Amino acid sequence: MVTDTVTTNTVSLQVEIPEDLHNCLRRFLEDRPLWDQDRTFSAALSLFLIQNGERDRCTSRIYLDTLFDPTVTI
């Protein structure tokens, strides 16, 4: 049996966002126990890059893995 194992290196970011956006994020996460801040930001950033012309398959893979595989740790 062959398994496809993908190792993703991570980078820690410190960002400032508007308080209203943070409050929306907090409410979103309270209702979705399988999601956390890291998963949400990974999905949002990868989607932004895809929508703005990024053609790297890795970006698409990260986006899809983040959306559909709750066990993925980004």
Image: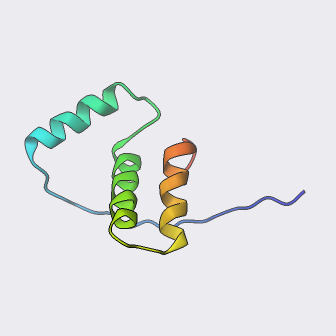
Question: Which residue lies most toward the right here?
Answer: 1
Q: Residue at x 28, y 63 (%)?
A: 13
* Left or right side of 9 for 25: left
Q: Position of residue 63 (x, y in %)?
A: 47, 56
Q: Position of residue 51 (x, y in %)?
A: 36, 63
Tell me which colouring the rendered structure shows: rainbow
* Residue 4 seen in the current view: yes
* Left or right side of 10 for 22: left
* Left or right side of 64 for 20: left
Above/below status of 46 relative to 27:
below
Above/below status of 53 relative to 13:
below
Q: Residue at x 53, y 69 (%)?
A: 58
Question: Which residue lies most toward the top here?
Answer: 31
Above/below status of 4 relative to 20:
below
Q: In the image shown, does 55 or 9 lie closer to the viewer? A: 55
Q: Position of residue 1 (x, y in %)?
A: 90, 56
* Residue 73 seen in the current view: no
Q: How many marks?
A: 0
Q: Quadrant of residue 31?
A: top left
Q: Residue at x 25, y 29 (%)?
A: 27
Q: In the image shown, does 59 or 14 lie closer to the viewer? A: 59
Q: Position of residue 44 (x, y in %)?
A: 34, 53
Q: Residue at x 33, y 45 (%)?
A: 37
